[in-house]
Amino acid sequence: MTKLINYTLYQIGWFCCVLGAANGRPWSGMAAASALLILHVSLARRPVVEMKLALAAGLLGGILDSMQSYAGLLVFDSWSGSLAPPWIVLLWMQFATLLRFSLSYLRGRYLLGGLLAGLGGPLAFWIGSRLGAVQFSQSTVLSLAVVGLVWAAAFPFLLWLAARWSGSESPGRYRVLSSRVA
């Protein structure tokens, strides 16, 4: 049940950010997604670990997507300049909430994680482009290939961070769904 709730919170946050940006209201989407992120952290048995992972993913994703934006591969309509917009950084933070919960089966499986992220990252960006939140200024194929390589490299690092900061703990759980104490 925890994994389903976790995945649902993430998906709702993803759509809030993407649809907010696509409709010229990125701040309203960010407000909703931020509330969901806060809810996740407050429900987690190890909220400090969850917050550290979210901040690390936000920083990493912000840098990586800013580099792609600066290179002209990604164009965020709701944002001027070459830095990644705040809503995309928040998406990376939201994504980090999956690491110890819904995606915990990938713990220690860095090659598989990289492969799945190398496919899933571009798919998410392609869907975001179809919804109007991002455009590819170069060829779509080139942009998606670079996004795939970025995600294939970044995701195993995030998995490693999640494992390191979790120690030998089993997959993440929400307090209200578990009688165990952290």
Image (tube, rainbow, N blue to C red):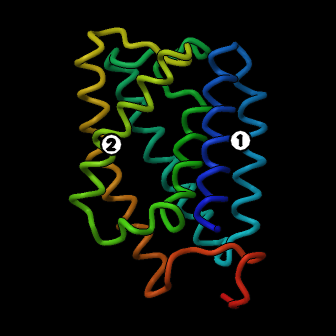
Neighbor class of circle 2 (other Cα within 10 Å; few <14, some 14-19, many 20+) is many
For the residue pair 137 and 97, the one nearer the viewer reads as: 97
The amino acid marked with disc number 2 is Trp
Q: Residue at x 61, y 32 (%)?
A: 86
User: Earlier along the polypeptide chain: callout 2 or callout 1?
Assistant: 1
Residue 84 relative to residue 139: left or right: right
Q: Which quarter of the picture shows residue 75?
A: top left
| Residue assigned mark 1 | 33
Q: Residue at x 41, y 74 (%)?
A: 163
Q: Residue at x 59, y 16 (%)?
A: 79
Q: Which quarter of the picture shows residue 87?
A: top right
User: SS class of the residue under badge 2?
Assistant: helix
Q: Which quarter of the picture shows residue 85?
A: top right
Q: CA distance from mark 2 to mark 1?
A: 21 Å
Query: Can you give x and y, in whole percent of width and height, for residue 142 in the image?
Result: 23, 19
Query: Can you give x and y, in whole percent of width and height, for residue 74 in the image?
Result: 40, 19
Q: Is residue 178 above or below residue 73?
A: below
| Residue assigned mark 2 | 151
The amino acid marked with disc number 1 is Ala
Q: Is residue 37 above or below residue 147?
A: below
User: SS class of the residue under badge 1?
Assistant: helix
Query: Can you give x and y, in whole percent of width and height, for residue 154 in the image?
Result: 33, 49
Q: Residue at x 50, y 28 (%)?
A: 84
Q: Quadrant of the C terminus?
A: bottom right
